[in-house]
Image (cartoon, rainbow, N blue to C red):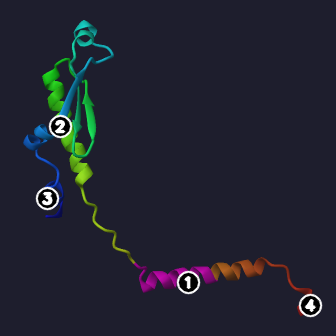
Amino acid sequence: MMGDENTEQAPSLDQLEQEVEITTYQASGPGGQHRNRTYSAVRMTHRPTGIAVTASDSRSQLRNRKIALKRLHDRLVDHFKIEAPRVPTRKNAGTRQRERTERDRLSAQKRLRQRPDPEQD
């Protein structure tokens, strides 16, 4: 399948762990003392592409690492996805004929709105 070919370029989770740079920092926001005093937030940067993700969802650094790794993998899959080229389409003969008939009808209707030309009498 074409979808399987696109994800082959994105590294697997095991391979991804070796290609990332992990930085921990102090999470901010609500959560009390445990969150404010510990370095539980995680920032992962994929060295080859430069894509970075953060996770500070949990008070646990280990849980945040797993969340960040999953987010990074999802971003890399999207990054390496190859879009199928657009195939230009044409209107079929019936549609072209219908549009032409509609244009002619509107043109005739607009011609009737014009003032009569006095020189033609």
Front-most of residues 51 and 108: 51
Count of marks overlaid on the render: 4
Going from the N terminus, do you reach mark 1 or mark 4 first?
1
> What's the amino acid at mark 1?
Arg
Q: Are marks 3 and 1 in contact (CB under 8 Å)?
A: no
Viewer-nearest of discs 2 and 3 = 2
> What's the amino acid at mark 3?
Asp
Mark on residue 100?
A: 1
Question: Where is residue 2 drawn, in percent x and y?
Answer: 17, 64
Q: Secondary structure at mark 2?
A: strand
| Residue occupying the point 25% across, 46% down | 49
The residue that label 3 is drawn on is: 4
Mark on residue 119?
A: 4
Front-most of residues 43 and 31: 43
| Left or right of 13 on screen, residue 36 | right
Viewer-nearest of discs 3 and 4 = 3
Give the magenta-colored segment's residue range.
Answer: 90-104
The residue that label 2 is drawn on is: 20
Q: Is residue 54 above or below residue 92?
A: above
- Label 1, residues with CA under 10 Å away: few <14, some 14-19, many ≥20: few
| Residue occupying the point 62% across, 84% down | 104
In the displayed orientation, state which residue is furthest to the left.
Answer: 14
Viewer-nearest of discs 2 and 4 = 2
Question: Where is residue 89 drawn, in percent x and y?
Answer: 38, 76
- Label 4, residues with CA under 10 Å away: few <14, some 14-19, many ≥20: few
* Magenta stretch secondary structure, dominant: helix
Going from the N terminus, do you reach mark 3 or mark 4 first?
3
Q: Is residue 105 above or below residue 32?
A: below
Q: Secondary structure at mark 3?
A: helix
Which quadrant of the rendered structure holds the C terminus?
bottom right
Q: Is residue 92 magenta?
A: yes
